[in-house]
Amino acid sequence: MINRLYDTSLSLLTDLYQLTMAYGYWKSGKAEQQAVFNLYFRKHPFGGGFTVACGLSSAISYLNEYGFSTKDIKYLRTLTGSDGQPLFEEDFLEYLKNLSFQCDVYAVPEGTVVFPNEPLLRITGPILQCQLLETPLLNLINFQTLIATKAARMRLVAPHDALLEFGLRRAQGPDGGMTASRAAYIGGFDATSNVLAGKLYGIPVKGTHAHSWVMSFEDELTAFETYARYLPNNVTLLVDTYDTIKGVKNAIVVGEQLRARGHDLGGIRLDSGDLAYLSIEARKLLDAAGFENTSIVASNDLDEYIMASLKNQGAKINVWGVGTKLVTAYDQPALGGVYKLSAFKNGKGEWENKVKLSEQTIKTSTPGIQQVRRYRNEKGFVADMIFDVRNVQEPEKVTMIDPYDFTRHRTFNANHAYEDLLQPIFSAGKQTYEIPPIEETKLRVQQQLAQLHEGIRRFVNPHTYPVGLEKNLFDAKTALILKLRGGE
Ligand SMILES: Nc1ncnc2c1ncn2[C@@H]1O[C@H](COP(=O)(O)OP(=O)(O)OP(=O)(O)O)[C@@H](O)[C@H]1O
Ligand SMILES: O=P(O)(O)OC[C@H]1O[C@H](OP(=O)(O)OP(=O)(O)O)[C@H](O)[C@@H]1O
Ligand SMILES: O=C(O)c1cccnc1
Ligand SMILES: [Mg+2]
């Protein structure tokens, strides 16, 4: 998408420090030493109990096009250090010019519910390549995951209603708008007002009309009649420009005219005032006039909390138009996803585990080549276990340790059903994964949410879904921390 907006390759869509480190790796002969990085987050957004993974399709497109163009190299040649001399040697620029993506990538499919500290994506390959990809992979996955999660929360509040995404005008620029429309659809919205998203992603497009339409006529009734005359099969009338109750009555007059001509009044839209009270009054008027099937659309700075409150108040809204607070993730505008080195092959060709220490033990990264095993029973998901693919206990008896409290264990045996979440996406730089159709991904979100205990889905103080470290991985991590702290 943004390729076309800026008419450039996107390999420079990274932080400068990735390139200076890449240069350093190359100079020190380490550029092609194999590394493993994991992309994960530490805390659910919005104080919630779950997160919906999204953005992998964009990451796949990005990686498929990875490579430095002649123009990219030309630009890099102009960068200088504090002495005014070029930052990068010509031979390095030549190396970049010839670079082709060679990594293995594993990732959790889009639409999967995920939890703190679990890798959403794991990349293995030459450290120089993995390093350069830190910034774009986080950029692509953090935002879409955030918006898909926000949308899923709104869907939970209104499981049987229509949800329309109206955010483009308030989105964080064109790409923010486009990716938010896609992620909102995956997260549970039914349609978008964003026509380009409709065209590019195959998302249904829907809409009503604005106040300006009404204001451009002498009176509201004429505005409604004119709209209904020209678009008789797309009539949702915005009734709050002057007086909402009078607006509903005018809409009913137009509804009757539409019926006389073999059409119907699709809906009315409320965009200000007390949406509970007004929707209840509008419903009464519409029903009394025989318009039981006419929808009541509400919009105006909605979010999942206002939607839940309106539901509690008995509001008669069956279509929700949500913009600003969805596409900007208003109450938490960023997901804090990170990308950390977890293993590095030494000169002898042996993997060495790596961790980043932290004052807070929970922030200390997890080493190894990680995979996530999700256990389930007939009621749904039970727990997730992060393990190292090279060293996992036999399924007959697997012990998982709570990283927040190592005295808490859980044991699984061969009777426990499970699936491993990280799927192969790229092998030696070649895509091996087929991106599912967007409808399948959207459905997956709802299927996944249905597997979560109700307490995990609630907004206020949700239950924490159990995520642990497999015992061998826990022991390896502990031993490495002790060694690095000099406690061995
Ligand atoms: N019954 C209700 N319960 C809780 N929140 C509501 C209810 N009705 C509307 N809201 C929300 O309250 C906020 C009202 O915003 P605001 O104070 O700007 O009023 P307004 O109706 O938009 O005013 P204006 O007529 O100036 O457009 C919106 O976020 C709206 O979604
Ligand atoms: O409120 P949001 O969730 O962002 O949904 C989109 C809003 O955009 C439109 O009006 P706009 O906000 O442009 O003008 P208005 O508030 O004056 O109606 C529309 O009428 C909605 O209110
Ligand atoms: O179609 C609508 O009603 C609409 C579209 C964008 C923003 N607000 C409303
Ligand atoms: Mg507004």
Image (spheres, rainbow, N blue to C red):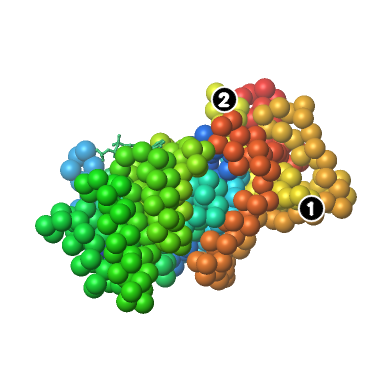
Q: Picture coordinates of residue 45 (x, y %)?
A: 49, 39
Residue 362 sits above or below residue 336 on the image = above
Question: Distance from label 1 to label 2 (Cα)?
Answer: 36 Å
Q: Residue at x 37, y 60 (%)?
A: 267
The image quarter containing residue 42 is: top right
Q: Nearer the viewer, residue 325 or 99?
A: 325
Q: Nearer the viewer, residue 295 or 25?
A: 295
Q: Is residue 118 left or right of residue 73?
A: right
- Is the CB atom of the residue marked by disc 2 within 8 angstroms of ligand 2's nearest atom? no
Can the viewer see residue 260?
A: yes
Q: Mark 1 falls on what kind of element?
A: loop
Q: Mark 2 falls on what kind of element?
A: loop
Classed neighbour count for the residue bearing mark 1: other residues with Cα under 10 Å, few (<14), some (14–19), many (≥20): few
Q: Which numbered circle lies on residue 378?
A: 1
Identify the amino acid type marked 1: Glu
Q: Residue at x 42, y 66 (%)?
A: 203
Q: Which numbered circle lies on residue 360?
A: 2
Q: Quadrant of the C terminus?
A: top right
Q: Nearer the viewer, residue 367 or 346?
A: 367
Residue 115 sits above or below residue 1 on the image = above
